[in-house]
Amino acid sequence: MSISAVGQITLIDYNDAVALTGYIESNRNTSVKYNTDSQAYNPSFSASTSLILSPHAFVAGASGGTDQFSPVSANIKSVVWKRKRNTDTAQVALGTGETMGSDYKLTVTANPFSASIYSVTYFCTVVYTDPNSGLDTTCVMQINFQAVSEGAGSVYAEITSAAGYAFKNAAPSSITLSASLYRGGNKDTSNLTYQWQKLVGSTWTNMGTAATQAVTPAVVSGMLLVRVTISDSVAGDSYTSDPCSIIDYTDPLFVQIVSSNGDVFKNGVVETTLTANTYQNGVLVTSGLTYAWSKAGDSSYSKTTQSIAVSSSDVTNKAVFSCTVTKA
């Protein structure tokens, strides 16, 4: 995914509230198995096998990408957990067995599924107060759990990932998705073929045909839906998994233009070098960038290097230079 930012040497705004991004970490797989023979859920989300959801939030541009929940920052103003089941029309308050701790983690010790409830989405709304401006920023994160049936006659396809389902600033470099087919609660590994697909617009587009599929940040613009169809060449049947969501939490770019010789000149003598420095997550970015310089009122002006030389011929009384930086 390409992202861009524009820097302008004559205008800097320090009063905007910061941007907040984040995700929810789960200690359990988002796919919950229901055995139709024993009528039991695995995991059962009981006191001994509880579901623990941990929020993680990051301030865009903050040095080092510090997780505001590790430890909990004093700038976290409020945290509210809610849920939405497939039978709900909107988010509702938590129910029995769903408790938020002092560390703002949500612990679920009661099974939220039933014969009619097969999907539960948990929402975490975080309000963060910028210590510099005093302004509040809200970030809403969510995670979905699906109950899938297994038993003597049940067959289903499933996607899992040991590395999780989220990127942050192009890290990790790749996520490997694994496709599995279960028959009656047992994993089938024989005579299978695979077809991975991603949702592009409203069309499912083919990807790979192996049992695993690598996904890189470059193909994820915000969020990507991926599914897999597994076919058995002997049994002659095929099954398509529920879509899997891959999310990219990318901090915005910040462009700062600096002048080697200041920004005020006298008697028409102008000689300086303008350099566009680009930051992401508080860290200076030095590779993978393209530059597009422009000058207000001069449509023919065009430069494509990080640094440009400016002389008297470029400035008549006043000139405003801008640089658009794009990261692939």
Image: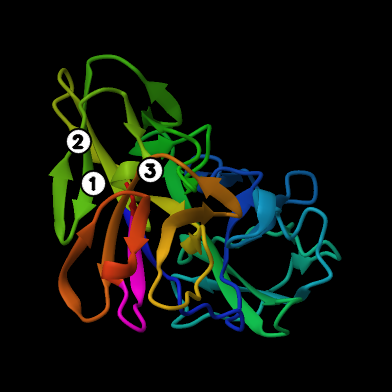
Viewer-proximal residue, 164 or 295?
295
Q: CA distance from mark 1 to mark 2?
A: 7 Å
Circles 1 and 3, Cβ within 8 Å, touching? The answer is: no
Q: Amino acid at mark 3?
A: Pro
Residue carrying label 3: 217
Circles 1 and 2, Cβ within 8 Å, touching? The answer is: yes
Looking at the rendered structure, the secondary structure element under dot 2 is loop
Residue displayed at 26% across by 22% down: 210
Residue carrying label 1: 198
* Location of residue 126 in the rendering, given as x and y in whole percent from the top left corner: 66, 73
Q: Which residues are magenta?
A: 315-325
Quarter where residue 93 is shown: bottom right
Quarter where residue 316 is shown: bottom left
Left or right side of 296 for 154 = right
In this rendering, does residue 234 appear at all? yes
Q: How packed is label 2: few (under 14 Cα within 10 Å), some, or many (20 or more)?
A: some
Viewer-proximal residue, 138 or 37?
138
Residue carrying label 2: 207
In the image, residue 228 above or below residue 194? below
Left or right side of 238 for 90 = right
Residue displayed at 60% across by 56% down: 24
Q: Amino acid at mark 2?
A: Met
